[in-house]
Amino acid sequence: MNGTLALVGSGEYLPPMEPVDRFLLGQIRGEARVVCLPTAAGKEGAERIGHWSNLGVEHFTRLGAQVEPVGIINRATAEDPGLVARIRAANFVYLSGGDPDYLFKTLNGTPTFAAIEGVLQGGGVVAGCSAGAIIFGEIYPGFPTLLPWRPAFNYLPGAVILPHYDEFGDSAFAKLARAAMPRRLTILGVEGNTALVCSDGKCEVRGSGGVTVCNSKRKVRLTEGEPVEWP
């Protein structure tokens, strides 16, 4: 990727994430043009879709960026040329949380995801929180039963992204996820108000929490500024 991919554990658009998002805005050449996609909440109704859209606009406006919501909420809107054009015109795309399976199926193979990839390949920023982070690993678990594991967009080969890791990192769910996934893979557990930020072939931790790297060989928690590596 030529741009910056930021995978957030939780806390999108809230004040504790301002330092991380200021950092991400600083990765953009020229004026930031942010689009907020509430796609993962597409099944939750107009009120929740509006909530995430408005929260994103308020947040990035406070940070001094040009920002607008883009209502990609289902396959039909993901193929709408007018909405896709607004993503292509952006240089910062933010995918907020919700249902990861719905998000992946809504975006996969669509002009919208091609436009998101275009922003990243063009040197822009793509950020995803919670569900928006999960879909960029190699695979993701089915919720709530874990199985079957599903193919994701594989921007981080060999990795499974688990957000909210400070909330359930030692829970039965997390232990079951570690036991159920293929042993060759590594869990990258991202805590709230924290991002795993990847650019120039390297990943690092940004934010007030940590990222836990967990596989069959080691388990280590990394914090602000530390590099994140896995096999």
Image (cartoon, rainbow, N blue to C red):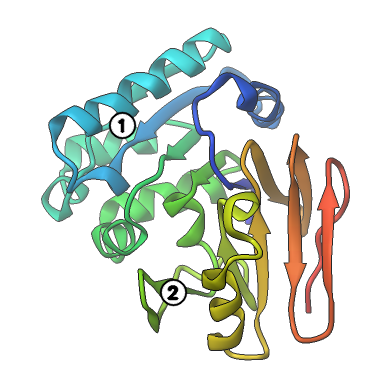
Q: Amino acid at mark 2?
A: Pro
For label 2, the crowd category at 10 Å Cα-Cα, with few meaning under 14, some 14 to 19 and many 20 or more, is many
* Disc nearest the viewer among 2 and 1: 2
**Location of mark 2 (residue):** 141
Q: Is residue 19 above or below residue 102?
A: above
Q: Is residue 130 above or below residue 144?
A: above
Of all residues, the one furthest to the right in this rendering is: 226
- Residue at image position (67%, 41%) is 194
Tell me the quadrant of the picture where the C terminus can be found. Answer: bottom right
Picture quadrant of residue 21: top right
- Residue at image position (46%, 26%) is 34
- Mark linked to residue 86: 1
- Residue at image position (41%, 24%) is 56
Contact, mark 2 vs mark 1 (Cβ under 8 Å): no
* Local secondary structure at mark 1: helix
Q: Amino acid at mark 1?
A: Arg
Asked whether, in this view, residue 20 is left or right of residue 78, the answer is right
Q: Position of residue 19 (x, y in %)?
A: 70, 23
Q: Position of residue 172 (x, y in %)?
A: 55, 72
Q: Is residue 171 above or below residue 195?
A: below
- Residue at image position (71%, 28%) is 23
Marks 2 and 1 sit apart, C-alpha to C-alpha, by 31 Å
